[in-house]
Image: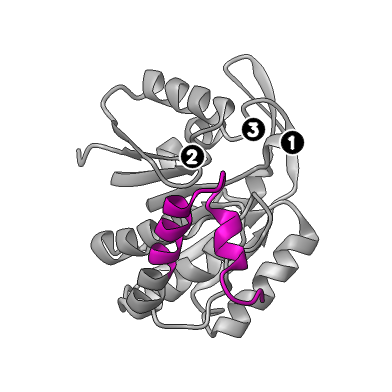
Amino acid sequence: MLKGGTALRASAGGGGVRKRMAQYAAWRELRRLVPGAGPRPDRRGWAVAPDLLLHLARTVRQRRPALVVELGSGVSTCWLALALRAFDVPGRLVSLEHSAPYAQRTRAQVRAAGVADLAEVRPAPLTEVVFDGERWPWYARTAWADLTGCELLVVDGPPGTTGPLARYPAVPLLGERLAPGATVVLDDYDRPDEREAVARWRRRHPAWSFRAVPHAKGTALLQLPWQ
């Protein structure tokens, strides 16, 4: 665990006192809203920033999802589970992780926070999937075949290093497993690949609402119609 505000300064992404203070304020509000010893965001750029963690916690409080599915595990896994506990939501979290060492690390964080009963970190190796005449490296179907009625989908993986538009398959493959009114949250919306992925999702599902939020790394929010 990192000391002081070092992690928060790094997570602001780009410097500037105003950005650093915004992340620090989000971190303080998250810890006030969701009691628990969750892990801090760390120095590396792939960590979910405090402003998005706070948004996810508020979403859990408001939507009270019975099933949260997360693509890519980490700090957010722990805080999502802590939010389920804090707001007494009778739901569960399933996080798909392709990296075995990283999955092990996340499980240790979840256990340390006392929410292992709410969060399942599933091994999900990347395999080739084919749809719309294209091939993509994505999470093995065996890892998510049983997931239905998802009310909150958090897309923070696979990493962009796995290939172009790495996160695009999330909606084409899991769209039919989302519940009416479900929310889709995509991290890193400031990156070109994520913007293109969202543009394709919106063309596939023009009835879904869309909003971009100016978080530290950009966040895209999509919501399904209730019917």
Which labelled disc corresponds to residue 161? 1
Q: Residues within 10 Å of mark 1 (few under 14, many from 20)?
A: few
Mark found first going from the N terminus, 1 or 3: 1
Residue type highlighted by circle 2: Leu
Magenta segment: 1-27
For the residues bearing labels 1 and 2, Cβ distance under 8 angstroms? no
Which secondary structure dominates the residues rendered in magenta?
helix
Q: Which residue is mark 2?
A: 174
Which labelled disc corresponds to residue 11? none
Say whether residue 192 is left or right of residue 175: right
**SS label for mark 2:** helix
Say whether residue 203 is left or right of residue 191: left
Tell me the CA gap for discs 1 and 2.
21 Å
Q: Residue at x 29, y 64 (%)?
A: 64
Q: Residues within 10 Å of mark 2 (few under 14, many from 20)?
A: some
Say whether residue 187 is left or right of residue 212: right
Q: Nearer the viewer, residue 48 or 101?
A: 48
Q: Which residue is mark 3?
A: 166
**SS label for mark 1:** helix
Number of numbered discs overlaid on the protein picture: 3
Residue 18 x %, y %: 42, 52
Pick out the residue farthest to the right.
101
**SS label for mark 3:** loop
Residue 75 x %, y %: 58, 64
Residue type highlighted by circle 1: Thr
Q: Nearer the viewer, residue 57 or 176?
A: 57
Q: Residue at x 39, y 70 (%)?
A: 30
- Is residue 4 part of the magenta span, yes or no? yes
Q: Residue at x 65, y 17 (%)?
A: 134
For the residues bearing labels 1 and 3, Cβ distance under 8 angstroms? yes
